[in-house]
Amino acid sequence: MTIQDQDRRDLEAAVELLESPSFVAKLSDLIGEPIEKVVNGLPAKASQKVEEVVHSALISLMNLAGRTLGEEQSKPASMITHKLAATVSGAIGGAFGLAALGVELPITTSIILRSIADIARSEGEDLNAIETRLACIEVFALGGSAESDDASETGYYAVRAGLSKLAPQAAEQLARSGVAQKGADFVARFVAKISPRFSAILGEKLAAQAAPILGAVGGATINYLFLDHFQNMARGHFIVRRLERVHGPEAIRKEYDLIAREMGFRK
């Protein structure tokens, strides 16, 4: 089956977004040196704190993705509004450096999640559905990687496949008792698969933001780029999910791979 006309153009746009994450490249251009050198200078305690804050924030936000967005479905996403909020948060983080870590990261993560949920709604997702909330959390795993990853585990569908093994049990657990239950092991395991990937790219953001030469203005710029990155990941992700609902997951997966090869993302 070949996807025709507008749906194929939408899928081409999704492939472009999902296969061309550019946050790290933009960071390197902004600070004038490879981001890896800056990340290596991040204190070990700060890296550990990032992991702790991210895991806690994702667990806390699991049930909150759509609560402040209203009920209207397929409304255009407010891309600029969330960028402005993230810019202010980044300015605070840039002004106070690592000292603001425990405050800025949860705020930034919350803003990103709300923007992701807004994009999901604009692509026809039901924000009251637990599956949609899990799909919103999945976006944090896109465009980032953990140290234990190899090349076969970092593609869009590879990431989704890894998370899909835990998603049904996590959804059932959320439906039954939310995330407050002490024994919510499937929810915790689902988040544990995501947080290292998000923490990796978040660590790159934090390291650049902590550079003394950047300050508040640099922190604001970095957060703008950071949110833009995850908005792109969310847009691509929920376009794919919308098309899967119409044409079926297998047909879209095959067409996605074909388009990725045509664009030079696959051999």
Image: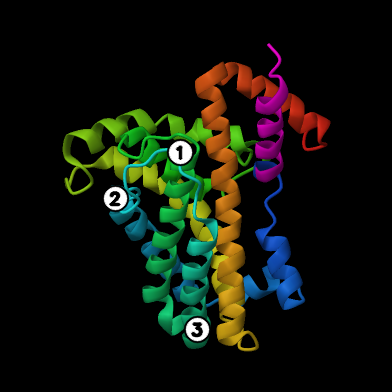
Q: Residues within 10 Å of mark 1 (few under 14, many from 20)?
A: some
Which residue is at the front of the view, 36 or 59?
A: 59
Above or below: residue 231 compared with residue 80: above
The picture places residue 3, in percent across and down from the top left corner, at 68, 19
Q: Residue at x 39, y 48 (%)?
A: 192
Q: Earlier in the sequence, mark 3 or mark 1?
A: 1
Quadrant placement of the N terminus: top right
Q: Report, in whole angstroms, how far the alpha carbon at label 2 lies from the one at label 3.
A: 31 Å
Q: Residue at x 27, y 41 (%)?
A: 185
Badge nearest the viewer, 1 or 2: 1
The picture places residue 58, in percent across and down from the top left corner, at 36, 54
Mark on residue 67? Answer: 2
- Name the amino acid type tagged 2: Arg
Q: Residues within 10 Å of mark 2 (few under 14, many from 20)?
A: few
Above or below: residue 27 compared with residue 209: above
Residue 187 occupies quadrant: top left
The residue identified by callout 1 is: 74
- Name the amino acid type tagged 1: Ser
Residue reaching furthest top? 1
In this rendering, position of residue 123 left or right of residue 187: right
Per the picture, the main secondary structure of the magenta-coloured stretch is helix
Quadrant placement of the C terminus: top right
Question: Does the magenta portion include 137?
Answer: no
Above or below: residue 251 compared with residue 77: above
The residue identified by callout 3 is: 97
Badge nearest the viewer, 2 or 3: 2
Q: Is residue 144 visible?
A: no
Q: Earlier in the sequence, mark 1 or mark 2?
A: 2
Q: Considering the numbered disc 3 on the image, is that residue within a helix, a strand or a loop?
A: helix
Q: Report, in whole angstroms, how far the alpha carbon at label 3 lies from the one at label 1.
A: 38 Å
Q: Which residues are magenta?
A: 1-17
Q: Residue at x 62, y 23 (%)?
A: 253
